[in-house]
């Protein structure tokens, strides 16, 4: 194995050359993780906000469950989705196993509880500040939920980043339901796992650095927009 | 009505009648229960005992005919005009009418030049003017003002007091809380004096300031009431 300098050189070379197979893996990784994060945000934002705004019997138990699900082991989720989508499973008829869709479903399951739990906390904090004013203005519970989500939009961007981070860095679930098939379901993390198992540690580390760079770029873009928007809207 | 929290009585058998017309000032020291009373009247809190009743029997009508401005106004993270638009949309107003109403309200509050500015970056005085304009936008019959000038400078205070006077002259019932005697003297037609959760006196402003019946009210006016 090369020293750190050699690894960095290989990573830089990989990024600069950006051959078709690497580009394909990067694009698929981003497509799967961004789609899963966006879909998880749609459900997680509404679910989290509902848990913050509404009071109903059993809410406490749901909150405990939701917080516990934040730490769901990816391999377990992968296995569950595998069983659901396998030919003999209840959703086997859709033929989704070892496809991009299966990977999106698995990541969606992993990210949704995280986004919902963090959203609940953000909206609950906003409720303390806004509740009386919104009730005074004539908001219904549903309008209040929508308003609080919009008021918390910059914080929710950070929540989405956390979700994206969990999705893009995850390997266990996508490996099980995607199968790490070249040109079909191979993403950055499964490629790293494969190169490691083959003993190509330099390539594996270099791919890891490409992955970290990608994650940093997405984070930097969102952080830049967030800072700009917060300056503009206060 | 009374209001208790964890065995502590914060409002104790408070009973009064508000007439349409005169500007009512709820006067009292900090912790007297003024803001709490206002929130109960506005329906944000329910009294532990007793009730608030209105001439109208419809709860929706009562709610839609009231507005409240808080000591620290909570403005939405959007433009000045959008803050007013928000409440008008909640009241089901059509877009062309909303635009006209927004223009009128911003003009009234002297904020027309700031209509596109984000509400959250306005100064304290401008934020309070916007909160008043937003309250005015829905054409309320009653507006509750909870120490509306507590956090703003004298120039903005003067503007806000003129605005409040304008509300009152336009037929809006104004109920305002303050611990500021000078402000109460400037604005009040009628005074409710609250002390440690009890309503000790309700009288016309002139009568209250010239010769209050209650000794604690007298002490408050002479600024030698220490809670």
Image: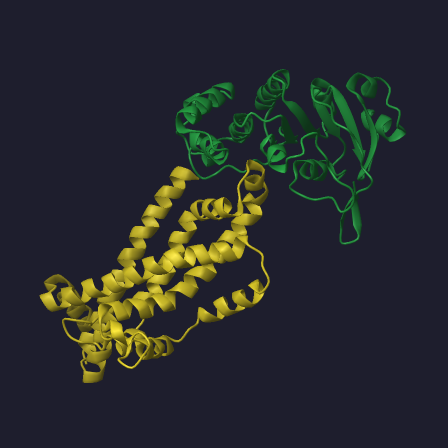
Chain colours: A yellow, B green
At 30% across and 74% down in the image, what residue appears?
A91
Left or right side of B35 for B119: left
Residue A4 visible at all: no
At 33% across and 46% down in the image, what residue appears?
A225
Compared with B215, A36 (above or below) is below
Return the residue found at the far bottom. Answer: A198
Q: Residue A155: x percent and y percent?
A: 43, 51
Q: Residue A134: x percent and y percent?
A: 54, 41
At 65% across and 30% down in the image, what residue appears?
B144
Q: Camera-side residue: A32 or B141?
A: B141
Q: Residue B54: x percent and y percent?
A: 70, 32
The quadrant the N terminus of chain A occupies is bottom left
Image quadrant of residue A115? bottom left
Image quadrant of residue B16? top right
Left or right side of B156 for B21: right
Q: Camera-side residue: B32 or A127?
A: A127
Image quadrant of residue B22? top right
Q: Camera-side residue: B13 or A6?
A: B13
Left or right side of A62 for A173: left
Compared with B74, B182 (above or below) is above
Compared with B151, A132 (above or below) is below
The quadrant the C terminus of chain A occupies is top left
Residue A182 visible at all: yes
């Amino acid at each position: 194995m090369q020293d750190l300098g050699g690894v960095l050189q290989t990573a830089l070379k990989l990024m600069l050359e950006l051959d078709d197979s690497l580009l394909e893996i990067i694009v698929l990784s981003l497509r799967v993780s961004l789609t899963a994060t966006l879909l998880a945000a749609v459900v997680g934002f509404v679910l989290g906000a509902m848990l913050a705004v509404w009071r109903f019997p059993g809410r406490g138990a749901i909150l405990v469950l939701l917080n516990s699900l934040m730490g769901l082991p990816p391999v377990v989720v992968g296995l569950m989705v595998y069983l659901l989508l396998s030919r003999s499973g209840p959703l086997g008829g859709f033929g989704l196993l070892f496809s991009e869709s299966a990977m999106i479903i698995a990541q969606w399951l992993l990210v949704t509880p995280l986004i919902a739990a963090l959203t609940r906390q953000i909206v609950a904090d906003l409720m303390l500040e806004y509740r009386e004013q919104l009730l005074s203005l004539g908001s219904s519970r549903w309008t209040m939920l929508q308003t609080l989500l919009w008021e918390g939009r910059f914080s929710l961007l950070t929540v989405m980043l956390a979700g994206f981070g969990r999705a893009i860095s995850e390997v266990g679930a996508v490996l099980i339901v995607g199968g790490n098939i070249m040109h079909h379901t191979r993403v950055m993390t499964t490629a790293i796992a494969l190169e490691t198992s083959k003993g190509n540690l330099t390539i594996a580390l270099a791919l890891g650095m490409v992955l970290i760079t990608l994650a940093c770029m997405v984070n930097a873009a969102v952080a830049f927009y967030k800072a700009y928007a917060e300056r503009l809207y206060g | 009505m009374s209001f208790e929290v964890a065995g502590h009585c914060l409002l104790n058998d408070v009973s009064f009648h508000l007439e349409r017309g005169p500007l009512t000032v709820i006067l009292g020291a900090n912790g007297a229960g003024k803001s709490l009373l206002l929130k109960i009247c506005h329906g944000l809190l329910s009294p532990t005992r007793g009730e608030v009743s209105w001439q109208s029997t419809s709860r929706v009508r009562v709610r839609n005919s009231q507005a409240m401005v808080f000591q620290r106004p909570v403005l939405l993270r959007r433009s000045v005009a959008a803050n007013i638009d928000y409440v008008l949309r909640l009241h089901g107003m059509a877009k062309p009418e909303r635009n006209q109403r927004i223009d009128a309200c911003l003009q009234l509050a002297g904020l027309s030049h700031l209509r596109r500015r984000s509400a959250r970056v306005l100064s304290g005085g401008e934020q309070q003017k916007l909160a008043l304009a937003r309250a005015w936008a829905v054409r309320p019959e009653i507006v509750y003002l909870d120490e509306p000038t507590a956090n703003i400078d004298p120039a903005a205070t003067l503007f806000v007091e003129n605005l409040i006077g304008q509300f009152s002259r336009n037929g809006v019932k104004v109920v305002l809380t303050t611990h500021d005697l000078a402000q109460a003297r400037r604005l009040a037609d009628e005074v409710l004096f609250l002390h440690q959760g009890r309503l000790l006196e309700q009288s016309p402003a002139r009568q209250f300031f010239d010769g209050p019946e209650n000794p604690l009210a007298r002490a408050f006016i002479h600024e030698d009431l220490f809670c």
